[in-house]
Image (tube, rainbow, N blue to C red):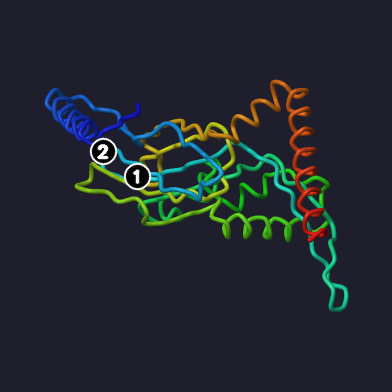
Amino acid sequence: MRLRRPLLLLFCALALGVGSATAADVGAVTAPALVVGTGIDKIAVTSRFTGRELLVFGALSHPGAVVVVLRSPPSALAVTQKVQTGPIWLTGQKVTVQKLPGVVQIAASAPLANLLPAQRRQQLGLDLGDLVARAQFVPEPQDRRRWEQAVLAAKERTGSFALKDHAVKISDGRLFSARLDLPASLPLGQYSLTTYLIRDGQVLAQSNERIDVEQVGLEQWVADVAEREPWLFGIGLTLLLAVLGLGLGIVMQRRSGS
């Protein structure tokens, strides 16, 4: 369920509370539930996109810890090893990392190690190092472990991979909010936003949302033309380059003549 206004979220939180009280009166046991909202269902990416903050908020039917995970579709990553030969650095082996999400942002109300055992964290995709270890390296390097560490470090350095403990704020045991810092280089596609309600090492409830990251503006128009009408794109690009070349030639002639 996607909520676009905090007022609606508060109403749902009150509804959860009333429902729990009513069930308790009749001796029933209500199942734990989550209500989650972001206020948006689409992120527009332009040539001037420098990243943004994503606010995730929600309500809990039962007390517990909260973990929010934003994950992008898998995207290929080219990695090149630099080899030092004397005072000179040369390009060494090249490896393409596949089946690895381009972006993984994890926010938790407490340290993940205190909330879930290691095996369960790996099953839920909450272990960033394990995600890299499960990725496919083509060609397979001999010292794969070192490559995995380099990829993880690069992802964390750019902000594509992030794990932040105590980043989810819980108020009155029922309302929560988290702010995710999205990097400037966002892969396009449909992202999954998963929220977990956790207590005593168990996942009590789970919410799944979707957020589309789309390219807009001139960049999107050019990409659409190149995909739908490749011949037209080729002709247009050739004409553009010809005009630019002609203009550059005229400028150079005028400068040489003066």
From the viewer's perspective, tell me whether residue 245 is left or right of residue 226. Answer: right
Gap in Å between the C-alphas at discs 1 and 2? 9 Å
Q: Contact, CB < 8 Å: mark 1 with mark 2? A: yes
Front residue of 184 and 94:
184
Q: Which amino acid does label 1 sit on?
A: Arg
Question: Which residue is the extreme one toward the left?
Answer: 25
The residue at which mark 2 appears reads as: 62
Q: Earlier in the sequence, mark 1 or mark 2?
A: 2
Q: Quadrant of the N terminus?
A: top left
Front residue of 173 and 169:
169
Which picture quadrant has residue 205? top left
**Identity of the residue drawn at 69% across and 55% down:** 148
In the displayed structure, would residue 251 be above or below residue 86? above
Residue 235 location in percent, x, y?
A: 78, 27
Question: Which residue is the extreme one toward the right?
Answer: 85
Residue 223 location in percent, x, y?
A: 65, 31
In the displayed structure, would residue 33 be above or below residue 97? above
Which picture quadrant has residue 142? bottom right
**Identity of the residue drawn at 57% across and 57% down:** 156
Residue 8 location in percent, x, y?
A: 22, 30
**Identity of the residue drawn at 58% across and 34% down:** 218
Which of the labelled discs sits on residue 199, or is there none? 1
In the displayed structure, would residue 96 be above or below residue 19? below
Residue 219 location in percent, x, y?
A: 60, 36
Q: What residue type is labelled 2?
A: His
Front residue of 246 and 119:
246
Which of the labelled discs sits on residue 29, or is there none? none
From the viewer's perspective, tell me whether residue 13 is left or right of residue 31. Answer: left
Q: Quadrant of the C terminus?
A: bottom right
SS of the residue at dot 1? strand
From the viewer's perspective, tell me whether residue 97 is left or right of residue 159. Answer: right
